[in-house]
Amino acid sequence: MAKRNRVAIAGVGYSTIGRKTGLTIEDLVAQATQAALDDGGMTVGDIDGISTLGSEALADGWMLGIEPLNWFSTSGASPAFVHPALMSIAAVASGMCHTALALRIIRQQPSGAELAAGDTSGNPMTAGLAATSGDRQFLTPFGAGSATQWAGLLTQRHMAQYGTTEEQFGHHAITQRHHASLNEDAFFRDPLTMEDYLAARFVSKPLRILDCDYPCDSGSAVIFTTEERARDFAKPPVFVDACSLSAIRDLNFEILEDMAVTSPAHCARELWSRTDLRPADVDTAHLYDGFSVITFQWLEALGFCGPGEAGPFVEEGNTRLGGRLPVNTDGGACNVGRRHGANFCIEATRQLRGECGERQVEGAEVSVFSNAFGPFSGAVLLTKD
Protein backbone atom coordinates (compact mmCIF):
# COMPACT_ATOMS: atom_id res chain seq x y z
CA MET A 1 0.00 0.00 0.00
CA ALA A 2 1.39 3.39 -0.97
CA LYS A 3 3.01 5.15 1.96
CA ARG A 4 0.87 8.25 1.47
CA ASN A 5 -2.30 6.14 1.79
CA ARG A 6 -1.17 3.85 4.59
CA VAL A 7 -3.92 2.72 6.92
CA ALA A 8 -3.21 1.79 10.52
CA ILE A 9 -5.02 0.10 13.38
CA ALA A 10 -5.21 2.49 16.34
CA GLY A 11 -7.50 0.68 18.79
CA VAL A 12 -9.01 -2.75 19.41
CA GLY A 13 -11.48 -4.03 21.97
CA TYR A 14 -14.12 -6.54 23.02
CA SER A 15 -17.41 -6.35 24.85
CA THR A 16 -18.25 -8.72 27.65
CA ILE A 17 -17.99 -12.18 26.07
CA GLY A 18 -20.12 -15.04 27.34
CA ARG A 19 -22.85 -17.59 26.83
CA LYS A 20 -26.38 -16.22 26.86
CA THR A 21 -25.28 -13.02 28.54
CA GLY A 22 -28.63 -11.31 28.10
CA LEU A 23 -26.83 -8.36 26.51
CA THR A 24 -28.58 -6.65 23.62
CA ILE A 25 -26.96 -5.82 20.30
CA GLU A 26 -26.77 -2.20 21.50
CA ASP A 27 -25.02 -3.28 24.69
CA LEU A 28 -22.42 -5.24 22.72
CA VAL A 29 -21.84 -2.32 20.31
CA ALA A 30 -21.38 0.19 23.12
CA GLN A 31 -19.06 -2.02 25.20
CA ALA A 32 -16.83 -3.08 22.30
CA THR A 33 -16.55 0.47 20.97
CA GLN A 34 -15.63 1.90 24.35
CA ALA A 35 -13.01 -0.82 24.85
CA ALA A 36 -11.40 0.03 21.49
CA LEU A 37 -11.49 3.76 22.23
CA ASP A 38 -9.91 3.21 25.64
CA ASP A 39 -7.26 0.98 24.06
CA GLY A 40 -6.26 3.73 21.63
CA GLY A 41 -6.63 6.64 24.06
CA MET A 42 -9.36 8.04 21.82
CA THR A 43 -12.83 9.53 22.11
CA VAL A 44 -15.94 9.16 19.99
CA GLY A 45 -15.11 12.55 18.50
CA ASP A 46 -12.05 11.01 16.82
CA ILE A 47 -14.26 8.76 14.62
CA ASP A 48 -16.02 9.88 11.45
CA GLY A 49 -16.86 6.55 9.78
CA ILE A 50 -18.42 3.23 10.76
CA SER A 51 -18.73 -0.23 9.20
CA THR A 52 -20.76 -2.99 10.82
CA LEU A 53 -21.77 -6.63 10.59
CA GLY A 54 -24.49 -7.87 12.91
CA SER A 55 -25.78 -4.39 13.71
CA GLU A 56 -26.89 -1.34 11.73
CA ALA A 57 -24.29 1.34 11.05
CA LEU A 58 -26.56 4.40 11.12
CA ALA A 59 -28.29 3.32 14.32
CA ASP A 60 -24.93 2.51 15.93
CA GLY A 61 -23.44 5.82 14.88
CA TRP A 62 -26.36 7.78 16.30
CA MET A 63 -26.37 5.80 19.55
CA LEU A 64 -22.62 6.26 20.01
CA GLY A 65 -22.78 9.96 19.25
CA ILE A 66 -20.74 9.83 16.03
CA GLU A 67 -22.30 12.69 14.10
CA PRO A 68 -22.16 13.62 11.39
CA LEU A 69 -20.82 10.49 9.70
CA ASN A 70 -18.56 11.09 6.71
CA TRP A 71 -18.93 7.43 5.68
CA PHE A 72 -20.87 4.32 6.75
CA SER A 73 -21.47 0.74 5.67
CA THR A 74 -23.69 -2.08 6.94
CA SER A 75 -22.62 -5.54 5.76
CA GLY A 76 -25.07 -8.31 4.97
CA ALA A 77 -23.86 -11.70 3.80
CA SER A 78 -20.10 -11.43 4.09
CA PRO A 79 -17.04 -13.50 5.04
CA ALA A 80 -17.14 -12.59 8.74
CA PHE A 81 -15.35 -9.61 10.34
CA VAL A 82 -12.89 -9.17 7.48
CA HIS A 83 -15.67 -7.55 5.43
CA PRO A 84 -16.37 -4.54 7.70
CA ALA A 85 -12.61 -4.36 8.29
CA LEU A 86 -11.88 -4.15 4.56
CA MET A 87 -14.68 -1.63 4.03
CA SER A 88 -13.10 0.55 6.72
CA ILE A 89 -9.60 0.15 5.29
CA ALA A 90 -10.84 1.14 1.83
CA ALA A 91 -12.75 4.14 3.18
CA VAL A 92 -9.72 5.49 5.06
CA ALA A 93 -7.32 4.78 2.18
CA SER A 94 -9.59 6.57 -0.29
CA GLY A 95 -10.14 9.58 1.95
CA MET A 96 -13.88 8.99 2.38
CA CYS A 97 -13.25 9.25 6.12
CA HIS A 98 -10.16 9.62 8.30
CA THR A 99 -11.02 7.20 11.13
CA ALA A 100 -13.38 4.25 10.78
CA LEU A 101 -14.84 1.99 13.45
CA ALA A 102 -15.28 -1.64 12.27
CA LEU A 103 -17.70 -3.74 14.33
CA ARG A 104 -18.74 -7.39 14.43
CA ILE A 105 -21.65 -8.15 16.73
CA ILE A 106 -22.84 -11.72 17.17
CA ARG A 107 -25.10 -13.49 19.63
CA GLN A 108 -25.11 -17.13 20.61
CA GLN A 109 -28.72 -17.88 19.86
CA PRO A 110 -30.92 -15.50 17.85
CA SER A 111 -34.59 -15.46 18.75
CA GLY A 112 -37.19 -17.23 16.62
CA ALA A 113 -38.30 -13.88 15.24
CA GLU A 114 -34.73 -13.01 14.24
CA LEU A 115 -34.29 -16.35 12.49
CA ALA A 116 -37.55 -15.88 10.60
CA ALA A 117 -36.33 -12.46 9.51
CA GLY A 118 -32.97 -13.81 8.41
CA ASP A 119 -30.96 -13.80 11.68
CA THR A 120 -29.97 -10.29 12.73
CA SER A 121 -26.57 -11.53 13.88
CA GLY A 122 -25.63 -11.12 10.22
CA ASN A 123 -24.51 -14.73 9.79
CA PRO A 124 -25.62 -16.14 6.41
CA MET A 125 -24.81 -19.66 7.57
CA THR A 126 -27.64 -19.68 10.15
CA ALA A 127 -29.99 -17.28 8.42
CA GLY A 128 -33.44 -18.37 7.37
CA LEU A 129 -33.71 -21.69 9.25
CA ALA A 130 -37.33 -20.85 10.02
CA ALA A 131 -38.19 -20.03 6.41
CA THR A 132 -36.01 -21.10 3.50
CA SER A 133 -35.99 -20.27 -0.19
CA GLY A 134 -33.67 -20.60 -3.17
CA ASP A 135 -31.35 -23.60 -3.33
CA ARG A 136 -31.53 -24.13 0.44
CA GLN A 137 -35.19 -25.14 0.21
CA PHE A 138 -33.97 -28.43 -1.26
CA LEU A 139 -31.64 -29.12 1.70
CA THR A 140 -33.47 -27.96 4.82
CA PRO A 141 -36.40 -30.44 4.61
CA PHE A 142 -33.85 -33.26 4.81
CA GLY A 143 -32.19 -31.86 7.93
CA ALA A 144 -29.29 -30.33 6.00
CA GLY A 145 -29.65 -26.80 7.31
CA SER A 146 -26.50 -26.75 9.43
CA ALA A 147 -23.08 -25.46 8.46
CA THR A 148 -21.57 -28.51 10.18
CA GLN A 149 -22.91 -30.67 7.36
CA TRP A 150 -21.10 -28.97 4.51
CA ALA A 151 -18.05 -28.63 6.78
CA GLY A 152 -18.11 -32.40 7.19
CA LEU A 153 -18.18 -32.76 3.41
CA LEU A 154 -15.18 -30.48 2.94
CA THR A 155 -13.27 -32.18 5.75
CA GLN A 156 -13.89 -35.60 4.21
CA ARG A 157 -12.77 -34.34 0.81
CA HIS A 158 -9.46 -33.05 2.22
CA MET A 159 -8.86 -36.43 3.85
CA ALA A 160 -9.77 -38.39 0.73
CA GLN A 161 -7.79 -36.22 -1.68
CA TYR A 162 -4.63 -35.66 0.36
CA GLY A 163 -4.55 -38.44 2.92
CA THR A 164 -5.08 -36.04 5.82
CA THR A 165 -5.78 -38.01 8.99
CA GLU A 166 -8.08 -37.58 11.96
CA GLU A 167 -4.99 -37.43 14.17
CA GLN A 168 -3.64 -34.47 12.19
CA PHE A 169 -6.85 -32.55 12.87
CA GLY A 170 -6.36 -33.66 16.47
CA HIS A 171 -2.88 -32.13 16.55
CA HIS A 172 -4.43 -28.86 15.38
CA ALA A 173 -7.04 -28.91 18.17
CA ILE A 174 -4.37 -29.76 20.76
CA THR A 175 -2.11 -26.91 19.58
CA GLN A 176 -4.96 -24.40 19.69
CA ARG A 177 -5.88 -25.53 23.20
CA HIS A 178 -2.26 -25.11 24.32
CA HIS A 179 -2.33 -21.51 23.07
CA ALA A 180 -5.68 -20.96 24.80
CA SER A 181 -4.19 -22.18 28.08
CA LEU A 182 -1.99 -19.07 27.97
CA ASN A 183 -4.94 -16.74 27.33
CA GLU A 184 -7.06 -15.68 30.29
CA ASP A 185 -9.77 -14.56 27.86
CA ALA A 186 -10.40 -18.09 26.54
CA PHE A 187 -13.39 -20.22 27.53
CA PHE A 188 -11.41 -23.47 27.33
CA ARG A 189 -7.96 -23.60 28.90
CA ASP A 190 -7.58 -27.16 30.21
CA PRO A 191 -5.00 -29.29 28.35
CA LEU A 192 -6.34 -31.45 25.52
CA THR A 193 -4.88 -34.85 24.61
CA MET A 194 -5.16 -36.91 21.44
CA GLU A 195 -7.28 -39.38 23.38
CA ASP A 196 -9.64 -36.54 24.33
CA TYR A 197 -9.90 -35.44 20.71
CA LEU A 198 -10.53 -38.90 19.26
CA ALA A 199 -13.14 -39.60 21.96
CA ALA A 200 -15.07 -36.40 21.16
CA ARG A 201 -18.40 -37.01 19.45
CA PHE A 202 -18.91 -36.57 15.75
CA VAL A 203 -21.30 -33.83 14.65
CA SER A 204 -20.96 -34.52 10.92
CA LYS A 205 -18.45 -37.33 10.44
CA PRO A 206 -15.47 -36.88 10.20
CA LEU A 207 -16.09 -33.48 11.84
CA ARG A 208 -15.94 -33.64 15.64
CA ILE A 209 -17.34 -31.20 18.17
CA LEU A 210 -13.76 -30.10 18.96
CA ASP A 211 -13.35 -29.04 15.31
CA CYS A 212 -16.15 -26.47 15.65
CA ASP A 213 -16.04 -22.94 17.02
CA TYR A 214 -17.88 -22.21 20.27
CA PRO A 215 -21.05 -20.08 20.05
CA CYS A 216 -21.17 -17.06 22.34
CA ASP A 217 -22.36 -13.48 22.66
CA SER A 218 -19.66 -11.07 21.56
CA GLY A 219 -18.97 -7.59 20.33
CA SER A 220 -15.63 -6.79 18.69
CA ALA A 221 -14.30 -3.42 17.55
CA VAL A 222 -11.24 -2.32 15.57
CA ILE A 223 -10.48 1.32 14.75
CA PHE A 224 -8.70 2.06 11.46
CA THR A 225 -7.19 5.46 10.71
CA THR A 226 -4.50 7.23 8.70
CA GLU A 227 -0.82 6.78 9.49
CA GLU A 228 -0.50 10.43 10.50
CA ARG A 229 -3.38 10.29 12.97
CA ALA A 230 -2.39 6.86 14.30
CA ARG A 231 0.97 8.16 15.49
CA ASP A 232 -0.82 10.64 17.78
CA PHE A 233 -2.81 8.00 19.67
CA ALA A 234 -1.86 5.91 22.69
CA LYS A 235 -0.76 2.61 21.15
CA PRO A 236 1.94 1.90 18.55
CA PRO A 237 0.24 1.79 15.13
CA VAL A 238 -0.10 -1.51 13.28
CA PHE A 239 -0.14 -0.99 9.52
CA VAL A 240 -2.16 -2.58 6.73
CA ASP A 241 0.34 -3.72 4.12
CA ALA A 242 -2.06 -5.53 1.75
CA CYS A 243 -5.57 -6.94 1.72
CA SER A 244 -7.84 -9.05 -0.45
CA LEU A 245 -11.55 -9.92 -0.67
CA SER A 246 -12.51 -12.89 -2.83
CA ALA A 247 -15.62 -14.68 -4.09
CA ILE A 248 -15.61 -17.62 -6.50
CA ARG A 249 -19.37 -18.28 -6.65
CA ASP A 250 -22.62 -17.71 -4.74
CA LEU A 251 -23.27 -18.95 -1.21
CA ASN A 252 -23.52 -22.66 -1.90
CA PHE A 253 -20.87 -24.55 0.03
CA GLU A 254 -22.34 -27.94 -0.85
CA ILE A 255 -21.70 -27.74 -4.61
CA LEU A 256 -18.27 -26.11 -4.90
CA GLU A 257 -16.34 -27.39 -7.90
CA ASP A 258 -13.32 -28.25 -5.77
CA MET A 259 -14.00 -28.80 -2.07
CA ALA A 260 -10.31 -29.14 -1.20
CA VAL A 261 -9.22 -25.87 -2.88
CA THR A 262 -11.76 -23.10 -2.39
CA SER A 263 -11.77 -19.28 -2.33
CA PRO A 264 -8.69 -18.87 -0.05
CA ALA A 265 -6.53 -19.97 -3.01
CA HIS A 266 -7.73 -17.03 -5.12
CA CYS A 267 -7.77 -14.66 -2.14
CA ALA A 268 -4.16 -15.51 -1.26
CA ARG A 269 -2.92 -15.02 -4.83
CA GLU A 270 -4.44 -11.55 -4.85
CA LEU A 271 -2.99 -10.74 -1.43
CA TRP A 272 0.60 -11.68 -2.37
CA SER A 273 0.29 -9.81 -5.68
CA ARG A 274 -0.24 -6.58 -3.73
CA THR A 275 2.87 -6.68 -1.54
CA ASP A 276 6.62 -7.24 -1.71
CA LEU A 277 6.41 -9.48 1.35
CA ARG A 278 6.38 -13.27 0.95
CA PRO A 279 5.04 -16.14 3.08
CA ALA A 280 8.48 -16.62 4.63
CA ASP A 281 8.31 -13.07 6.03
CA VAL A 282 5.23 -13.83 8.15
CA ASP A 283 6.00 -14.29 11.85
CA THR A 284 2.56 -15.35 13.05
CA ALA A 285 -0.72 -16.19 11.30
CA HIS A 286 -4.31 -15.96 12.53
CA LEU A 287 -6.44 -18.14 10.31
CA TYR A 288 -10.16 -18.67 10.60
CA ASP A 289 -11.12 -21.87 12.40
CA GLY A 290 -14.90 -22.00 12.38
CA PHE A 291 -14.04 -25.58 11.48
CA SER A 292 -10.54 -27.08 11.59
CA VAL A 293 -10.42 -27.74 7.85
CA ILE A 294 -10.66 -23.99 7.20
CA THR A 295 -7.32 -23.39 8.89
CA PHE A 296 -5.81 -26.23 6.85
CA GLN A 297 -7.03 -24.68 3.58
CA TRP A 298 -5.57 -21.29 4.54
CA LEU A 299 -2.18 -22.75 5.46
CA GLU A 300 -1.97 -24.24 1.97
CA ALA A 301 -3.50 -21.28 0.12
CA LEU A 302 -1.15 -18.74 1.71
CA GLY A 303 1.88 -20.83 0.79
CA PHE A 304 2.98 -21.77 4.30
CA CYS A 305 3.02 -25.35 3.09
CA GLY A 306 2.27 -27.11 -0.19
CA PRO A 307 -1.15 -28.29 -1.43
CA GLY A 308 -2.38 -31.11 0.77
CA GLU A 309 0.50 -30.67 3.23
CA ALA A 310 -1.35 -28.87 6.04
CA GLY A 311 -1.86 -32.07 8.01
CA PRO A 312 1.83 -33.01 8.22
CA PHE A 313 2.76 -29.33 8.69
CA VAL A 314 0.58 -29.13 11.80
CA GLU A 315 1.58 -32.57 13.06
CA GLU A 316 5.26 -31.59 12.95
CA GLY A 317 4.58 -28.75 15.41
CA ASN A 318 5.13 -25.88 12.98
CA THR A 319 1.99 -24.03 14.06
CA ARG A 320 2.73 -24.22 17.79
CA LEU A 321 4.31 -21.38 19.76
CA GLY A 322 8.04 -21.78 19.22
CA GLY A 323 7.39 -23.44 15.85
CA ARG A 324 8.06 -22.16 12.36
CA LEU A 325 4.72 -20.32 12.14
CA PRO A 326 2.69 -19.91 15.36
CA VAL A 327 -0.98 -19.96 14.34
CA ASN A 328 -3.99 -18.63 16.26
CA THR A 329 -2.02 -17.76 19.35
CA ASP A 330 -5.15 -16.68 21.27
CA GLY A 331 -6.47 -20.25 21.01
CA GLY A 332 -8.74 -19.66 18.04
CA ALA A 333 -12.52 -19.49 17.94
CA CYS A 334 -12.85 -23.09 19.12
CA ASN A 335 -11.51 -21.91 22.49
CA VAL A 336 -12.13 -18.15 22.78
CA GLY A 337 -15.60 -18.36 21.26
CA ARG A 338 -17.16 -17.57 17.92
CA ARG A 339 -16.25 -13.93 17.56
CA HIS A 340 -16.69 -14.45 13.82
CA GLY A 341 -13.20 -13.60 12.69
CA ALA A 342 -12.63 -10.43 14.71
CA ASN A 343 -10.45 -12.20 17.26
CA PHE A 344 -7.92 -13.03 14.53
CA CYS A 345 -7.49 -9.35 13.62
CA ILE A 346 -7.28 -8.31 17.26
CA GLU A 347 -4.79 -11.03 18.20
CA ALA A 348 -2.62 -10.21 15.16
CA THR A 349 -2.62 -6.56 16.24
CA ARG A 350 -1.69 -7.38 19.82
CA GLN A 351 1.10 -9.71 18.66
CA LEU A 352 2.65 -6.94 16.57
CA ARG A 353 2.39 -4.57 19.53
CA GLY A 354 4.10 -7.15 21.76
CA GLU A 355 1.16 -7.33 24.18
CA CYS A 356 0.52 -11.08 24.39
CA GLY A 357 2.46 -12.05 27.49
CA GLU A 358 3.22 -15.78 27.73
CA ARG A 359 1.93 -16.39 24.23
CA GLN A 360 3.92 -13.57 22.62
CA VAL A 361 5.81 -14.49 19.44
CA GLU A 362 9.26 -13.01 19.97
CA GLY A 363 10.21 -10.33 17.46
CA ALA A 364 6.90 -10.47 15.57
CA GLU A 365 6.89 -7.85 12.81
CA VAL A 366 4.58 -9.30 10.14
CA SER A 367 1.26 -11.05 10.63
CA VAL A 368 -1.67 -12.13 8.51
CA PHE A 369 -5.29 -12.74 9.46
CA SER A 370 -7.94 -14.40 7.33
CA ASN A 371 -11.65 -15.14 7.51
CA ALA A 372 -13.93 -17.71 5.90
CA PHE A 373 -13.45 -20.12 2.99
CA GLY A 374 -15.65 -21.96 0.51
CA PRO A 375 -17.30 -19.49 -1.89
CA PHE A 376 -15.96 -16.31 -0.25
CA SER A 377 -13.08 -15.16 1.94
CA GLY A 378 -10.83 -12.27 2.88
CA ALA A 379 -7.33 -11.69 4.25
CA VAL A 380 -5.24 -8.79 5.56
CA LEU A 381 -1.46 -8.58 5.90
CA LEU A 382 -0.32 -6.44 8.84
CA THR A 383 3.11 -5.06 9.75
CA LYS A 384 4.69 -3.50 12.80
CA ASP A 385 5.91 -0.60 10.64
Image (cartoon, rainbow, N blue to C red):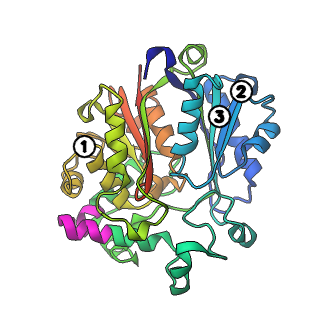
Residue 94 is left or right of residue 42, and the answer is: left
* Secondary structure state at the residue bearing disc 3: strand
Mark 3 or mark 1: whose residue is earlier in sequence: 3
The answer to which quarter of the image holds residue 231 is top right
* Secondary structure state at the residue bearing disc 2: loop
In-front residue for pair 195/230: 230
Label tally: 3
List the residue tagged with mark 1. Answer: 303
Split into 4 quadrants, where in the image is the C terminus? top left
Mark 2 or mark 1: whose residue is earlier in sequence: 2
Residue 79 is left or right of residue 95, and the answer is: left
Mark 2–mark 3 CB contact (< 8 Å): no
Cα separation, mark 2 vs mark 3, equals 8 Å
Mark 2 or mark 3: whose residue is earlier in sequence: 2
Amino acid beneath label 2: Asp
Q: Which mark is residue 48?
A: 2
Amino acid beneath label 3: Leu
* Secondary structure state at the residue bearing disc 1: loop
List the residue tagged with mark 3. Answer: 101
